[in-house]
Image: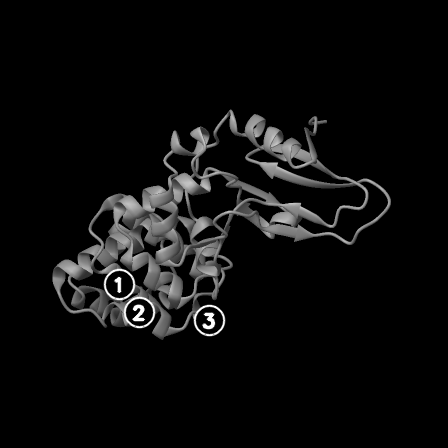
Amino acid sequence: MNKKWEFSLIKIGHADFRNMLGSSKPEAGLVAKIVEAVEWCASRAAKSHILDVVRGAMPDVDKANSKHEQVEIGWLGNFFDKAKNISDKEMQTVWSKILAGEFNNPGSFSRKTVEILSMLEKADAEWFENLCSFVVKGEIFMNFSPLIFDYQGKIYNDNGISFDALDRMAHMGLITSSGIVDYSAQFPPKDIVRTSLFCYGPKQFSLSVPAGKKEVPKGKTIFTKSGKELARVCTVKNIPEFPDYFIAEYKKRGFEVQPVNAP
């Protein structure tokens, strides 16, 4: 690393910054981008929090293909201005994942998403992770979406989802909720049965759309744009009994869902 960047790193209060990054050895351009943004922040404690986030991000940055030069300095400055207040280690992990994701693919996370994240309490983050445990993936779910049929259902309540949790997430701008009726995916009506594949965790399922049906219910909750962005960095657990639950719920609505056997 040349003397210019060495001096800049010492200036932000961590002469051993390079060691904090471990064996990742980021290129000077990436370090320069970080330094430029971090210098927006003044206090030593704030910079310590920022560097914790940076250190957590570096293992996930694709050094060979990183597009860090395309990341706006304004986005980074705003990100670090918010990250400087994050002292909780688990929350810092989420911030690290977002930083790495933005370096790898600039534009992945909007400023609005960063703003929402900065306002989340730890309990909010835990509620959101609980919600992500009910996410299914497939074309009819706009790539991925939580599948919430009844927020008073035992399977949801037992796994940290309640009306209060959903109301709080809606207030924060992470989800929208229809309340009573299901959101639906539109299908052109046909005289034949059609199938649509989707996944829950590692398992794949086939949903049969009866002849003449033009709408497929997909629950009462959907992610906002910011919710989708944050969901991509959430650590989620699969709920073993959930497939049986949503198979039964679809049956009530006149649809057949079956597991797809792995080859």
Amino acid bearing label 3: Gln
Query: Residue 194 vs residue 30: left or right?
Result: right
Q: At 35% from the left edge and 57% from the top edge, which residue is drawn? A: 172
Query: In which quarter of the view is residue 8 placed?
Result: bottom left
Query: Is residue 178 at all visible to an observer of this figure?
Result: yes
Between 176 and 233, the residue placed more toward the observer is 176
Q: At 34% from the left edge and 48% from the top edge, which residue is drawn? A: 23
Residue 28 in picture, x, y percent from top left: 36, 66
Amino acid bearing label 1: Lys
Q: Nearer the viewer, mark 2 or mark 3?
A: 2
Residue 56 in picture, x, y percent from top left: 32, 49
Query: Residue 153 vs residue 164: left or right?
Result: right
Q: Determine whether 24 is above or below 259 in the image.
A: below
Query: In which quarter of the view is residue 99 placed?
Result: bottom left
Name the residue tied to disc 3. Answer: 70
Q: Nearer the viewer, mark 3 or mark 1?
A: 1
Q: Tell me which numbered mark, 2 or 3, is placed earlier along the sequence.
A: 3
User: Marks 2/3: CA distance?
Assistant: 16 Å
Q: Residues within 10 Å of mark 1 (few under 14, many from 20)?
A: some
Between 144 and 187, the residue placed more toward the observer is 187
> Is the C terminus in the top left, top right, bottom left or bottom right quadrant?
top right
Dot 1 and dot 2 residues touching (CB under 8 Å): yes
Name the residue tied to disc 2. Answer: 78
Residue 33 in picture, x, y percent from top left: 34, 69
